[in-house]
Amino acid sequence: MTGFELFKKRLQHHYRFYNRLRHTTVDWTVWVYIFIPFFIVGASFYIDLWLKVPIWPENVSAEFMLMVVVFLMYLGSHYAFLFNADVLYLWQKIDLINALNRYRIGYMALITFVKTSLFMILVSPIFIQYFNWDALTYLKFSILVYILSTAKELLKREAKIRLSKWTYRFSILLLMIVYFLMLLKSVTNDWAMLMVSIVILVSSMVIVLSKPQKFYQEIEIDTEQRNQFTQLILMQSAHIGAPEWMTQSNNQVSNRPWIFRNSQKLYSTYTPQFAYQELMIKTLLRRKKWVLLYLQFTFGGVALIVLFPSWYKVLIYLILLFFIGQLARSYWNQIVSERFLELFYWKPVELSNVSKKMFRLMMVPSSLLFSIALGYKLFSYVGIIIVPIIGFILSFIIADFFSRRVIINI
C-alpha cells in the first residue's frame, strides 16, 4: 500500500464518520425551516452590502475587521488520520508515515484554501465598497490571509503536541498578535508582508516535516477534536428538535473549581428550595466548559447586535434571548439527570419554581448586556435605560416559558 492509498482510505473513513453524524442530526425539516431561510436572508443581505444599502459598515473601522479576520484565522483544526491500532504495524513503516503526513498537510492546505476563499468572498463588499479597497489590493490581502492561515494550522497543532498547556496558549496568543500586526502593515506594504508570510509558511512546513510525530499525542488531539465537534453538533441539534439525550456529555467537574472551592453555604436560611438552587449554581459555575460556552454566546451575541443594521438588531436580540433560555433549559436537564442525585434523599419541593428562578438568574447577565448594546445602538444613551427594562420583562417571560418544559423529577 502506498502513502496516497493509505491517505485515501483514512479520508474516506473520516468522511463516513461525519456523514453518519449529519444523517443523525439533520433531516429535511432542518433544511426547510432553518438552512434554506437562512440562505435566502443571507443572500439578500449580501446583495445589500454590495449595493451599500446598510450604512452600519461605515461606522466599522478597518482595524476592527482585521481583528475579526485574525479571530476567524485562529479557529479551525486538522487531523493526523492516525488510529490506535497503527502502533502495531504502521508506526514501524517510517516512509509510509511520512507520506501520510505529507498528504494530510496538502489536504489541510486545500481545505484552508476553500474556507479562506469563502470567508474572503463574504466580507469582500465591506472592504471594497465601504473601505474603498481596489480589487488587486484585496486579492493580495486574501492571499496573505490564506498563507498565514495555513501556517497557523501547522504551528497550532505542533505547539499543542509539544508544549505545555499554558505555554501553548501564550504562544498562540503571541502568534495571533503578530498576525494582526502583519495584516495591519499589509495595508501599506502588501508585497513585503506576502514575502514574510511565505517565509513563515515554509519554515512551519520544515519544522513539522523534520520532527518525528508523537503518536499518542496525535491520536489524543484527533479524538478530542472529533468529540468536541460531535458534542457541538448534537447540542445544537437538540435545540431544533433532536432527542434530549443528544445533549448529554461527560462534563468533568474540575478538581480545583474556579469558585466555591470551600463549598460554603450560599444562603443563611436553608430550605429544600434553597438547597436545589445552590446545587444548580455551584454545578454550573464549577464546569468550565459550560461557563465558557455561556460567555462565548453572550459576547458573540453582543457583537452581532453591534454589527448588524437596525432592523436586524431587534430580530437578532429576540433570537438571542430565546437561545439563552434554551441554553438554560439544556443545562437544567443535564444537571437533574445526573446519577449522583439518586444517592441522596431530597425533601419534597416544587422544582418548577426552582427552575423558574434559576432560568431568570441565568438569563439576567446576557439579557442585560444584549439590552445595553441594543439600546445604545438604536436610541443612544436613553436606550441604555429603557431597553434593559424591556429586556428584563422579556427574559422573565421566556424563563417562565422554558421552566414549564423541563425535567422536574429527580
Image: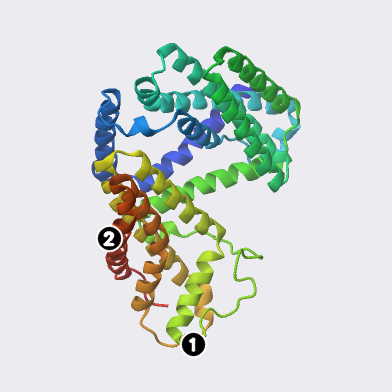
At horizontal 52% and vertical 37% (from top left) the residue drawn is 75
Q: Is residue 175 left or right of residue 145?
A: right
Quadrant position of the C terminus in the picture: bottom left
Q: Nearer the viewer, residue 151 or 211?
A: 151
Are discs 2 and 1 less than 8 Å apart at CB? no
Quadrant position of the N terminus in the picture: top right
Dot 2: within a 10 Å radius of its alpha carbon, few (fewer than 14), some, or many (20 or more) residues? few
Residue 289 location, x and y as percent? 54, 56
Q: CA distance from mark 2 to mark 1?
A: 32 Å
Q: Is residue 317 left or right of residue 172?
A: left
SS class, disc 1: loop
At horizontal 38% and vertical 58% (from top left) the residue drawn is 368
| Between discs 2 and 1, the one toward the N terminus | 1
Residue 204 location, x and y as percent? 68, 25
Residue 248 location, x and y as percent? 46, 60
Q: Nearer the viewer, residue 31 or 205?
A: 205
Residue 102 seen in the figure: yes
Indicate the quadrant where residue 56 lies: top left
Count the marks: 2
Three-letter amino acid code at disc 2? Ile
The residue that disc 1 covers is 269
Q: Is residue 234 above or below residue 209?
A: below
Q: Is residue 153 left or right of residue 230?
A: right
SS class, disc 2: helix
Three-letter amino acid code at disc 1? Thr
Numbered circle sitting on residue 378: none
Q: Nearer the viewer, residue 91 or 302?
A: 302
Dot 1: within a 10 Å radius of its alpha carbon, few (fewer than 14), some, or many (20 or more) residues? few
Between label 2 and label 1, give the one nearer the viewer. 2
Numbered circle sitting on residue 390: 2
Residue 150 seen in the figure: no
Residue 165 location, x and y as percent? 69, 47
